[in-house]
Amino acid sequence: MPVYSIRGVDVDFPFDAYDCQITYMDRVIESLQQGKNALLESPTGTGKTLCLLCASLAWRRTFGEFLRGGRGGGRGGGGSQPPHYGSQLSGSQQSGDPLSQQEHSGYPVSQQQHSGYPVIIYASRTHSQLRQVIKELKATSYRPKMAVLGSREQMCIHSEVSKLRGRAQNNACHFLCKKRRCQHNNNVAEFMKNKPDFGSKPFDIEDLVNIGKGKSSGPCPYYISRELSKSVDILFAPYNYLIDPGNRRSLNSIPWNNAVLIFDEAHNLESICADAASFDLHPNNLTACVAEAHECIKLCSVKRSTENSADKQFDAENYAILKALLMALEKKIGELVIESKELGCTKAGSYIYDFLSELNITSDTSKKLIETIDCASLLLEEGNSAETGPGVQAKATVSRLESIRDILDIIFRGGGQDHAKYYRFHVNESQQTSGDALKVLGKSSRTLSWWCFNPGLAMEEFLKLGVRSIILTSGTLSPLDSLAMELNLEFPVRLENPHVISPDQIWVGVVPVGPSGQALNSSYRTRETIQYKQELGTAIVNFARIVPDGLLVFFPSYSMMDKCVEFWKNRNHSNSAAENTIWQRICKHKQPVIEPRQSSNFPIAIEDYAAKLRDSSTSGAIFFAVCRGKVSEGLDFADRAGRAVIVTGMPFATPTDPKVRLKREYLDKQGTPSENTKMLTGNEWYVQQAARAVNQAVGRVIRHRHDYGAIIYCDERFAWPNYQSQMSYWLRPYIKCYSKYGEVVQGLTCFFRDKATSDPLKLKRTDCNDCIAPVTKKCMPEENLSDLAANARNEYPQITLSVNSTTKSNFMKLAQITPANRSTLATKHNSSSMSHHFSEDQLSQDTKIQRCCWLG
């Protein structure tokens, strides 16, 4: 195994590193050694995760061996001196860092951890992404003491509690553990005592769950992970565990001081931070809270009569006050003057304190209110679980009041008012529909919102905790300046890495016009016109003919996707009754799948897509999806699964949306920039949000060193310099703007013809550095497709399906999905709807090319 000396730190790396990987690890170590924050952009496929792990763990090991066990695996290099990259530590750095002076203290392991050894906290957006990170850790020689945090929904193995969700599950768990009635929790202490070295080998959530299920009363996976987190070298957790103040409070065993905080896939971090500091109080939630307070009053009467208890938990008067306050709040929201239904009622953030003070809710009284809500939650738990144990009824009765507690925490944190300048108070009115629960039809409903427009507030919390360095990394962070301004942090260490692929592995084209010369522009002025939809559809027909295997088409919104698909299916828009519709022409070349709006249906769509790619009777599949949607985030469309991405337009947020409008106004009112400081304007933020969504979507292709594919921008605005400057740094050198559609077809055809004769999947490889697919002698496309479906099920666990390609019954469920994941044309087996069977004589030259590439 190669060893690289980078800034005086010996880094074990599983493969011979590329130059961009050495550069990336150099920046990581620079950030950690100097205690500075870093923004690191490196494209998907450049081994970013592996570099992060190896560099950070090598740096951590310079302070002492890992807890309870060491490095495992040994070091390669045959005794020769490793190559040196970057600068060595200066004398002042070596002596000035108090950590570098520490030796093994002889303390017990847990005391060593809290005596100054830095903890690495590695966060990603989802558990499926963390699963991939832990898989990468297994490929290294490093064996740090680790833990991975998950939710009860993923880890609970109790026969009854595991059926619940959300706060209902949390509260039921608390109740049983408090009463010592969960045998799984009772067995955790014995397990930890008998397995003191557990965590010294990489494991993920599934491994913990399997341990718990291995015996009839196995130890609780959730509380094993919590115990492990008290003494670790590296801790893996989803974003919300760290950013949400409530979740973070529950991790009080973590030594935050001097910890290293790594946010992987951090392209959405600013919006996640802002959302965590904001709230929306919907009318049905408020109504449910009133009902819960009333239920507490009734439970108190029963408890006092049967148990004669003087416990304050059973004081009905407190719950009567709580109920009265909630009803008064509901009334007061209804009394606010709203001059315009479109604009709502907007006031300065500080108005929330005046608004609540009229109900006698202040920073001081909120503490008593929070205490009452906590007691109410416990009372409701016991009321539902006292004799029969937790059941489904608890789901409906223990979740809403705690949302009021969270709101009070947000409003009055730190005593309140200091952070109000970063907020806007807003009340929006909407008409109730038949789908709204707990409402009266026809009656208007009002939502009270308090929106945070400074994501940096969450980052400030970490600085107060004393973290050493914050590293943000992703394949799509650009532009870095605006991200740093939004988070209100200094990021002295920065990197925008190139890709490891060669120029002949990627084709990037801006297509400003369609086949008949009509401009392609998805702005609101043109997107509803017949000419635009006709031109875009015809262009996609040609791309479906040329591109082999999997083709992804991204729209700015679900609404636009639905309208285009509906238009393409409509025979009235054909030139003659005998002519096929645009949809039928697309289906002739590729079997279609449409991204569903409902998350629960998404795994079915992914499996349908994978099954259609496996179908040897056709030339591939086409996935119609949405920027910022489920397809565009976190899934790996490597090799055959994604040979090309089409972006049909810029996914600008609705400008009249109150939250978007107020965010733009907030940025524009931040004041004039000083000579050395550039301020982000509302319009710059608006464009950059759309650009990041596009960058994330196009990142679905080119997933590893040997992958290849095309990126097709079907909107003339992508040719504009101010739009191209927002694209990912690594992509810009490859962009070519075409003036004629025929040149696009010719260039794309030549690209895939060349790749058909040199497809790297045909070549045996001895290593898979940067490859997202399973590490094998040959990256098998079938395994990639199975991984794609498995990742979708992990990310959206509401539904479980088989990946077996011979199983057809799962896809019969697609007929029930709206919008349909399988077109009506695709489900009928007749020649007029979809051409499943071609003879060689019927194949055009381009179709032969794609068949050759696909079979290869």
Image (cartoon, rainbow, N blue to C red):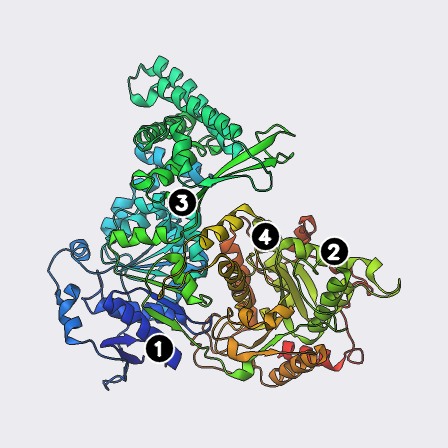
Residue neighbourhood size for the residue with mark 4, other residues' Cα within 10 Å, grouped as few (<14), some (14–19), many (≥20): few
- Earlier in the chain: of badge 1 and badge 3, it is 1
Spatial distance from mark 3 to mark 2, Cα to Cα?
42 Å
Q: CA distance from mark 4 to mark 2?
A: 22 Å
Q: Which mark is residue 654?
A: 4
Describe residue 656's horizontal placement relative to residue 674 as left or right: right
* Badge nearest the viewer, 4 or 2: 4
For disc 3, the marked residue is 152
Relative to 171, residue 828 above or below? below
| Dot placed on the residue nearer the N-terminal end, 4 or 2 | 2
Q: Kindly report which numbered mark, 1 or 4, lies closer to the viewer in this rendering.
A: 4
Give residue 799's position: percent from left, percent from top: 55, 50
Residue at 38 percent across and 43 percent down: it is 420
738 or 239, which lies in front? 738
For the residue labelled by badge 4, is the local secondary structure a helix, a strand or a loop? loop
Say if residue 377 shows up in the picture: yes
SS of the residue at dot 2? helix
Q: Nearer the viewer, residue 322 or 820?
A: 322
Mark-to-mark CA distance, 1 and 4 = 39 Å
Residue 566 badge: 2
> Splitting the image into 4 quarters, where does residue 14 fall?
bottom left
Circle 2 packing at 10 Å, graded few (<14), some (14-19), many (20+), is few
Name the residue tied to disc 1. Answer: 23
**Mark 1: few, some, or many residues within 10 Å (few <14, many ≥20)?**
some
Q: Residue at x 28, y 52 (%)?
A: 229
Taking the view exactly as shown, the residue that stands out farthest to the left is 106
Q: Residue at x 33, y 67 (%)?
A: 53
Amino acid type shown at disc 2 = Glu
